[in-house]
Image (spheres, helix red, strand yellow):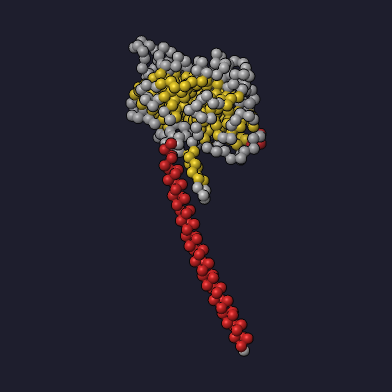
């Protein structure tokens, strides 16, 4: 009996200790959980503060990355980046081969005498600029291309002689006119089925009898339009205030003495792709009424080649050039400036056929070229290795990227084509 009592007592003690230990462990686990959940909650709040405090400095597809002990967040700011590309800031794992792509060349018919000149895309909706050999055909087209096999025309508009370039910024399209009457026009696209011309603007001229030039390049940022023109007797770079959308106003100008093919503005610096010896110019536009040249780049081959296209991404700048008639391997056509504020440091590559569009998304750079049967090329972002090339069937004139899909202004009556990567 005594043994049985001792066993029972021992079991009771063991049970009591076990219960106490379990309760203690649960209490400690609860305390630990509360602490850890508090850390996670604070981390989320910290991430929110970090992302949104920095987002005012993010334009286009610049990404703000915030990291802590638990996770990393990346945020791309599109709301405050009217006019910039909606290309994904990062691409997933892609097999760069013929089996990894779908190419849709059919576009939409613009008419036999009409050809596309520029393209931008938002959420699968294509905004296409065009130019015909007369003023009768329409020159801006809005197309639903979310299903590229059966793209549908939403609307179109005839603005006049023809368009060389466009910028989509929120509910507006700003267009560069190939006209001596007006060089800038603003189109309301709040209702994409019924685009409406809001305003037209004629550049100031040195004398009342001087004929204004054709506009050739356009960029929108923070209520200002930066407009480039062909070479003429006046300045080729203009700053125009469009904060009053119905009444554009001249602000300032700068003389380049050459055709401007492309413009990109970032942190009060305007980058110009030009056609003379200074094929990349950097202008300080912090005082918009008085742009000042602060740096320039004069690559070999400038006598026959032109600075053609610019793109900016996360502090880096790309410049593409034409080939200049025939290819000289020492005169490179593709350039990456890893730090856009210091263009003395650069990577470059010879691209036979020239570069007419570029999208930098490390570890890749995507190029639109006029190389026969290799109009679309993918390189690593140091230009060390070509990863992929494919024919587009035509020498397209402009390239746009919407998320991970690429769109090309074909420069002919088909208007555009679409290339999708299958991940």
Q: Residue at x 46, y 56 (%)?
A: 38
Left or right: where 332 falls relative to 223: right
Q: Position of residue 84 (x, y in %)?
A: 47, 32
Q: Is residue 202 shown above or below 362?
A: above
Image quadrant in which you'd find residue 225: top left
Q: Is residue 335 left or right of residue 257?
A: right
Q: In the rendered view, would you say 357 is above or below 208?
A: below
Please identify the residue farthest to the top as the structure is shown. 209
Residue at image coords 49%, 41%: 65
x, y percent for residue 396: 56, 24
Q: Residue at x 49, y 38 (%)?
A: 63
Q: Quadrant of the N terminus?
A: bottom right
- The residue at the point 55 percent across, 74 percent down is 17
User: Quarter of the image containing the C terminus?
Assistant: top right
Q: Position of residue 149 (x, y in %)?
A: 57, 35
The front one of 377 and 266 is 266
When the figure is inspected, residue 138 is found, relative to residue 68, above or below; the finding is above
| Residue 69 percent location from the top left of the image | 51, 49
| Residue 419 occupies quadrant | top right
| Farthest bottom residue in view | 1
- Look at the image and tell me whether residue 325 can be seen: yes
Whether residue 114 can be seen here: no
* In front of the other: 35 or 254: 35
């Amino acid at each position: 009996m005594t043994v049985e009592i001792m066993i029972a007592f021992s079991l009771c003690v063991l049970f009591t200790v076990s219960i106490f230990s379990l309760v203690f462990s649960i209490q400690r686990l609860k305390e630990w959980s509360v602490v850890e959940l508090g850390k996670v909650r604070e981390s989320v709040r910290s991430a929110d503060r970090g992302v949104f405090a920095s987002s005012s400095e993010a334009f286009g597809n610049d990404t703000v990355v915030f990291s802590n002990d638990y996770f990393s967040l990346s945020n791309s700011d599109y709301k405050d980046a009217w006019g910039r590309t909606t290309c994904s800031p990062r691409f997933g794992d892609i097999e760069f081969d013929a089996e990894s792509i779908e190419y849709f060349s059919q576009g939409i018919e613009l008419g036999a005498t009409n050809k596309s000149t520029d393209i931008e895309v938002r959420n699968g909706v294509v905004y296409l600029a065009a130019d015909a050999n007369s003023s009768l055909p329409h020159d801006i087209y809005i197309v639903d291309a979310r299903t590229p096999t059966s793209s549908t025309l939403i609307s179109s508009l005839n603005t006049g002689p023809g368009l060389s370039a466009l910028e989509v910024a929120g509910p507006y399209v700003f267009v560069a006119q190939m006209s001596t009457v007006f060089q800038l026009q603003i189109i309301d696209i709040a209702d994409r089925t019924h685009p409406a011309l809001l305003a037209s603007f004629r550049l100031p001229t040195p004398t009342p009898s001087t004929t204004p030039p054709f506009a050739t390049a356009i960029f929108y940022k923070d209520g200002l339009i930066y407009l480039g023109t062909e070479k003429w007797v006046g300045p080729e770079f203009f700053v125009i205030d469009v904060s009053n959308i119905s009444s554009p106003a001249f602000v300032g100008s700068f003389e380049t003495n050459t055709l401007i093919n492309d413009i990109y503005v970032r942190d009060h610096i305007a980058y110009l792709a030009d056609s003379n010896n200074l094929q990349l110019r950097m202008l300080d536009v912090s005082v918009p009424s008085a742009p000042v040249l602060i740096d320039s780049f004069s690559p070999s081959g400038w006598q026959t080649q032109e600075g053609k296209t610019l793109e900016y991404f996360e502090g880096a700048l790309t410049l593409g050039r034409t080939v200049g008639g025939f290819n000289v391997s020492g005169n490179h056509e593709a350039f990456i400036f890893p730090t856009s504020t210091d263009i003395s440091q650069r990577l470059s590559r010879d691209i036979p056929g020239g570069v007419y569009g570029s999208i930098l998304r490390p570890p890749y750079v995507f190029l639109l070229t006029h190389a026969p049967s290799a109009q679309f090329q993918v390189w690593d972002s140091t230009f060390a290795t070509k990863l992929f090339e494919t024919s587009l069937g035509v020498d397209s004139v402009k390239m746009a990227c919407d998320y991970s899909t690429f769109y090309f202004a074909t420069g002919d009556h088909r208007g555009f084509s679409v290339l999708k990567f299958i991940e």
